[in-house]
Amino acid sequence: MKTQLSLRDLMDQLKAENLLSPDVNENLASILTQEHVVPWAVNILMGLGIWLATLLFLGFMLLALTLKDPMLVVVGGSVLVATAILLNKLSKESLVLDQFALAFSLTGQILLSIGLSEMPIHKAWVALFIFVLAVILFIIYQHQVHRFLTVLIAVSAALFLLQSLNLEQGLPLLIFAIAGGAVWCWLEEASCLVRLPTLQRPLGYGLAVALLGLVSPSLPFLREFFYTNWTFVTLGLTGLLLFVIYHNLRLYRVAITTPSSLIIFASTLLVSGLLYQAPGVIAAVIVILLGFQRNNRFLMGLAFIFFLLFYISYYYYLDVTLLMKSITLMSAGVILLGLRFGLKPIYFDTSINTVNNP
């Protein structure tokens, strides 16, 4: 007659036979001692309810404060940010306190931005203050979503700083810096996770999303609102794209002087030259390669969506006839398919050799 063992009895039996390591034993014990586990759907509904209630309350508070003295708005924002930091330290595993702290922090930063902008202070100092505050919160506020959002806030503050100083031509440098940071963060993911285990992911995702957002004004229907020299942006992003390709070739142990490597570099330069007014396509390709190398489906999916947006927009606004557009699209497809089937055997053999001869 078969007896059915419970998970606790099985764990005790494995422990008695010295088949269970101490660390695994502690982890299983902590799981078994939990009284209940809240389903993920309940957590989502609780989070949405908390956000709705919090945002309604803070919305009324925002409207009330903005009708008063700007100094009162700054004080209110400071209090909310300080409260959010305190709640973050106390929240631990509490979903309610966690969501309240997140809402308080974001609303407090909004209040600080509004209040300081209404005061007789140069806009550059306001942008610099928001940037520094975002960096500080990114470090001390222990919440992945909040850290991701503070990266976007810091990039927005840096962009506003350039505009307030009438340095719009510095946008290519900002885009190149953000792109370089994203490339470094993902190519060095292993070492970053060792040194910055809780900062790497939100920083990497934030820089990647910020990069795709900063090149969005290059879309033809947005250029009349945002002006910059996109040729310099394309040159900088092309250099980074070549570096990422070079890094991937070294990863697969493909020599730079081989015909396949030269074809890849030449094709990259040719495509970048043709898309010199569409840097968004190149930025999306960079993020796609980073996601492919790190086996990160979220990065690849996000970049692919932006790639389609940038490429379709570029193709639609080409100042040529529909026949020439069709020929261009078919030619590009044939070339890419040819490169794919031509280079696949080379990389397949190389990967086999890499595994057999590490």
Image: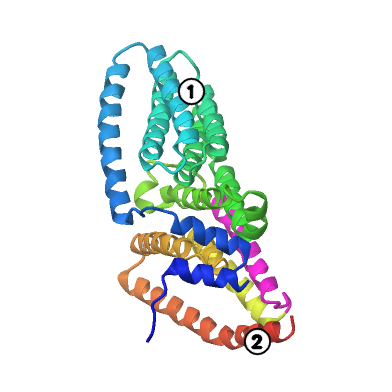
In the current view of this chain or complex, which residue is farthest to the front? 1
Q: Is residue 66 above or below residue 215?
A: above
Q: Is residue 313 visible?
A: yes
Q: Is residue 273 above or below residue 198?
A: below
Most foreground residue, 282 or 166 = 282
Amino acid type assigned to the residue bearing label 1 in the image: Lys
Residue 107: quadrant of the picture = top left
The local secondary structure at tag 1 comes to helix
Q: Residue at x 35, y 54 (%)?
A: 36
Q: Which residues are magenta?
A: 232-257
Q: Where in the figure is residue 310, as x and y percent of width and height?
A: 40, 59
Amino acid type assigned to the residue bearing label 2 in the image: Ile
Q: Which mark is residue 123?
A: 1
What quarter of the picture does the N terminus occupy? bottom left
316 relative position to 232: left or right: left
- How is the rendered protein coloured? rainbow
Q: Residue at x 41, y 59 (%)?
A: 306
Q: Where in the figure is residue 47, as x and y percent of width and height?
A: 31, 44
Q: Which mark is residue 331?
A: none
Predominant SS of the magenta segment: helix
Eye-nearest disc, 2 or 1: 2
Most foreground residue, 345 or 203 = 203
Q: Is residue 235 visible?
A: no
Q: Where in the figure is residue 23, as x and y percent of width and height?
A: 61, 61
Q: Residue at x 50, y 34 (%)?
A: 89
The residue that disc 2 covers is 352
Question: Label 2, label 1: how many angstroms apart (C-alpha)?
Answer: 58 Å
What quarter of the picture does the C terminus occupy? bottom right
Q: Residue at x 48, y 30 (%)?
A: 85
How many C-alpha atoms fall within 10 Å of the one at disc 2: few (<14), some, or many (≥20)?
Answer: few
Is tag 2's residue or tag 1's residue first in the polypeptide sequence? 1
